[in-house]
Amino acid sequence: MSLKMKTSKKQFWTALCGTIVATIPIAAQRQVIIANEAPNSIVMVSSDNAGNELIEVMNTSQLPHVHDPQIPRFILTDREGNFALGIGGYVRTVASYDFDGLVNNIDFIPAAIPNHSPFGNQIQMDATTANIFLKLVGTSPILGDFIVHTEGNFRGNGNTFKLRNAYLSFSGLTLGYTYGGFMDAAAMPATIDFQGPNGGAFYRATQIAYLCDAVDNFRFNLSVEMPQVNGSTNNIFQIGRQRMPDFTAFAQYNWENNSHIRLGGLIRSMTYTFTESQKTNDALGYGVQASTTFAAGPVRMFGQLTYGKGIGQYLNDLGDLNVDLVIDPQNAEKMQVLPMMGWYAGAQYNISPNLFVSGTYSMARLYSENDYQETAPTDYHYGQYLAGNVFWNASNELQFGVEYLHGWRTNFDQSDKQANRINLMAKYSF
């Protein structure tokens, strides 16, 4: 055999092998991968090939907050189409720089602006908000259509995994740990700052909730939630186990373009002990709330107003101040609940499908009763929060953002401090 013929055969087999190898990734992208032909076998598909029904279920059950993950890239499903498991999340890195005043927190919390600080500048980097979740969607003879959702990030002690959502939902019932009924996650504006507006109501609770959407354009929700009471105590008062859950309710009217208006309320009974007599007392807390989001052409508006007594743990700026219950200066044997308020207003302008800018102003305020401010003149009275940002979606998975934040903290004695922060963010969803 001549050298020329050997060379031609070698080139032919090399070209053939190269063609086969090159087509493998294309085939893997276009074909459903099936483990076997048994009825209970598992099918793995990309979200692009999952079919309209699976995509619709994953979309409609997606949590609405700006920091919630997108629908997963990959889905596991059985051959019968009765169960689908989505696996997804994101990696999110934020670099921030505080100047002309700083906040003693990785999040921009005006209540955490110190009264006295020798430092006016700081740099921080954070990747602990990286998120991972599992969502099972299915149908069964007992539950009907159901959703099981577990999710977490790495903001536990020592950057350990921290649970954010873990619940079962079916037939309008939600059982487990997720967003509470006294908040409106869909009406929160977009911020790189992970906490968001300081006057916003934002929390999670273990709960039993029922949502009714049988009436056109209306949704009604009732929930019974595990209470968490944070108070300013001393050796005379003690806050321990609670004996009543928190009760929340809301009514919401929806219209086109994911627009809605919501009215909600909360009532709670908080238990504390007067240690000298070992007498247990209860203090009544309550809250009312109105929130909305609506679209007007390329602009989307966001807003929320919350007012109540003893609801500090529900408001972003007041959540770490232990003001659900405070000592009553006019009654040595009792604690009191203080009035408090939080609100925000924001707007988002969509320059293009992949680029938008937004701005938000927010305020949280703690009021005084029974001479409370006289006993704590340098304690937090109110805080203000101003945010402006730009988000660019470089692709369906990759997002970049830049943000400016300005915060004020004012105490009861009218002394005030301020802080400024620049945030840079890169986020990849999977």
Image (spheres, rainbow, N blue to C red):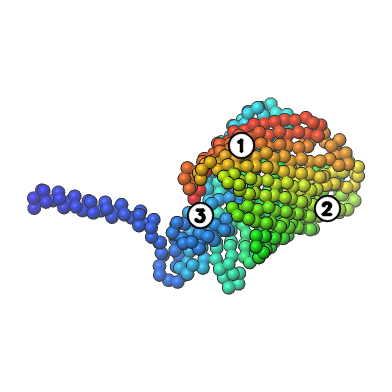
Amino acid type, label 2: Leu
Front residue (pair 321, 399): 399
Residue ID for mark 3: 72
Above or below residue 382? Residue 396 is below
Q: Mark yes or no: residue 23 visible.
A: yes
Amino acid type, label 3: Pro
Q: CA distance from mark 1 to mark 2?
A: 38 Å
Q: Residue at x 48, y 59 (%)?
A: 75
Q: Secondary structure at mark 3?
A: loop
Q: Residues within 10 Å of mark 2 (few under 14, many from 20)?
A: some
Q: Secondary structure at mark 1?
A: strand
**Disc on res. 379:** none
In the rendered structure, the answer to whether residue 422 lies left or right of residue 264 reads left
Q: Mark 1 or mark 2, which has the lower sequence index?
A: 2
Above or below residue 143? Residue 19 is above
* x, y percent for residue 232: 80, 43
**Disc on res. 388:** 1
* x, y percent for residue 256: 60, 55
Q: Secondary structure at mark 2?
A: strand
- The answer to whether marks 2 and 3 mark residues whose Cβ atoms lie closer than 8 Å is no
Q: Mark 2 or mark 3, which has the lower sequence index?
A: 3
* x, y percent for residue 238: 82, 48
- The answer to whether marks 1 and 2 mark residues whose Cβ atoms lie closer than 8 Å is no
Q: Mark 3 or mark 1, which has the lower sequence index?
A: 3
Above or below residue 79? Residue 314 is above
Q: Residue furthest front?
A: 297
Front residue (pair 290, 182): 290
Front residue (pair 190, 7): 190
Amino acid type, label 1: Gly
In the rendered structure, the answer to whether residue 275 lies left or right of residue 68 reads right
